[in-house]
Image: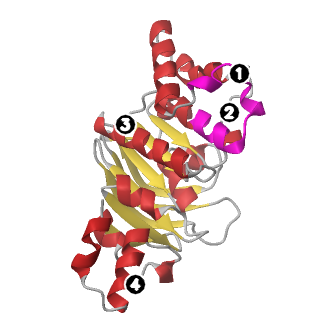
Amino acid sequence: MSLQLTGVGYRYAGATAAALLDIDLLLGPGEVVGVAGASESGKTTLCLVAAGLAPRTVGGQIRGTILLDGEDVDAWPMHRLSARIGIGFQNPATQLSQVAGTVFEEVAFGPMNLGVPRNEVVSHTWAALETLRIENLAERDPFRLSGGQQQLVAMAGLLAMRPEHLVLDEPTAQLDPEGTRLVGDAIARLAAEGASILITEQKTDLLAAIAARVIVLDGGRIARAGTADDVLADPGLAELGVAPPAMHRLRRAAADAGVAPGTLGSLDG
């Protein structure tokens, strides 16, 4: 299972400048690739393009090639793509079905639409709720929850579909540290089961914990790319509008203060 973008560029309808330029990106099976960048750097646009929503549902012009498991998806209709790629956004209200009366029904909505057998829908739904520790919300109205709870419900809906590929645009934006950890654990579990995952995040500590590779976007182009350790330790991240993970900031501050590197070793865990 792989998702590959080659020479991909994208311009929104009516825009004079491209939002993405010359994007080359390959996600292999079981791989988590993180995307960082300042506001308006192209992170959300990359998610829309990778998941097939742009230009199919939002218009605009695209160039380059997108391959899903080796197949060119240019002519694929949206319903075929959505059966293979799950996508999550930072605003959970845009993902809730608007028709489910309970959280359980909301989480079950996706796999039901994919034609998953009833017994599997039920087991997948409970497993997703338990993974994110929100099984106690199963009978609640999705629209009477906090924003953070809704975010976890939306994420559970994606987990219940057991996607082969997953595109996430700042999925922990409304979550506290515990919720962020639960989502990170869920993403790692999906990757361990073979899913390829693209995730944009402002929380670089999360990217450091779950991503094998990280790219940094700047003006719609890839400005940095490499292993998570190498990219997130780059001293030039701040100039690109990206805050390094806490450990890298601590190491840099210690180095500036003349503290020996070995002194911080006990903090790495």
Does residue 182 show up?
Answer: yes
42 is higher (above) or lower (below) than 96: below
Q: Alpha-carbon distance for marks 1 and 2?
A: 8 Å
Task: Locate residue 34, reporting x and y percent.
Answer: 41, 57
Query: Which residue does the image show at 63% across and 21% down from the upper left?
Result: 138
Residue occupied by mark 3: 190
Contact between marks 1 and 2 (CB within 8 A): the answer is yes
Q: CA distance from mark 3 to mark 4?
A: 35 Å
Q: Hey, what amino acid is under mark 1?
A: Ala
Instruction: Assess disc 4: are there few (<14), some (14-19) or many (≥20) residues with their C-alpha within 10 Å of its C-alpha.
Output: few
- Of the two numbered discs 3 and 4 in the rendering, the one whose residue sits closer to the viewer: 4
Task: Give the SS element for disc 2.
Answer: loop
Check disc 1 and report the residue beneath it.
100
Is residue 109 or residue 177 the one in the foreground? 177
Q: Amino acid at mark 3?
A: Leu
Q: Quadrant of residue 40?
A: bottom right
Q: Which residue is mark 4?
A: 253
Q: Main secondary structure of the magenta part?
A: helix
